[in-house]
Amino acid sequence: RVLYDAMHGAAGGWFDVLLRSLGVDVAGLRVEPDAHFGGGQPDPVGPRIGPLIARMRSCTGLVLGIANDGDGDRVGVVDGRGRVLSETQVLALLVDHLAETGRIARGVAIGVATGSLVEKVARARGLAVERHAVGFKHLSRALLAGRVDVAGEESGGFALAAMGPDKDGLLAGLLLVELVAQTRRPLEDRLDLLEARFG
């Protein structure tokens, strides 16, 4: 089951509807567009996704919480334990999943402020790692130059070269749903394995 918080942003009515069309059980929160974002800041982090965290903590079974920011280019994730995952943890999970499924081979571009877990996972999967200055434009250049397949940064931006050179929070969320659906295991189990191996 997916709990999805659009934070009254542009992704509401897209991410949740697409998942439902694929047969996924989705419960939507704040999916109605609102130019004032319900009076809050549409940033999918910590206390700003409090409604999603509260709902996740009351759920049982295989469940994943996904949130997108106002324009849908960043993703926030809440695992089955009700924990908000850091951007580094999310990116490490995405890199590991994409490498395991054979969809990336060239490398990963990350921002200088991105945690070391991403780099450790990428290198263990045989991927080159490039660190760039803060700002997704630097990561986009690495994607466009054809040196890397994935780019991600500390603010929750993620891009996959096969889908385009700019941040796509909906794609990141869909890939995480795919990971849980394919493994039939909670996202926190996969993260526990990565952190046990790499710190």
Image (cartoon, rainbow, N blue to C red):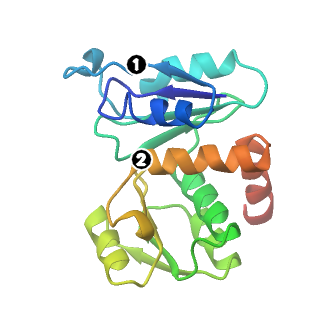
Decide if residue 63 is on the left or right side of residue 54: right
The quarter of the rendered structure image containing the N terminus is top right
Q: Which residue matches tag 1?
A: 30
Outermost residue toward the left in this view: 35
Secondary structure under tag 1 reads loop
Residue 111 in view, yes or no: no
Q: Earlier in the sequence, mark 1 or mark 2?
A: 1
4 in relation to 195, above or below: above
- For label 1, the crowd category at 10 Å Cα-Cα, with few meaning under 14, some 14 to 19 and many 20 or more, is some
Secondary structure under tag 2 reads helix
Residue drawn at (74%, 50%) of the image: 182
Q: Quadrant of residue 36?
A: top left
Residue 78 in view, yes or no: yes
Q: Which residue matches tag 2?
A: 169
Q: Position of residue 98 (x, y in %)?
A: 61, 65
Query: Label 1 amino acid?
Result: Arg
Query: Label 2 amino acid?
Result: Gly
Q: Quadrant of residue 144?
A: bottom left
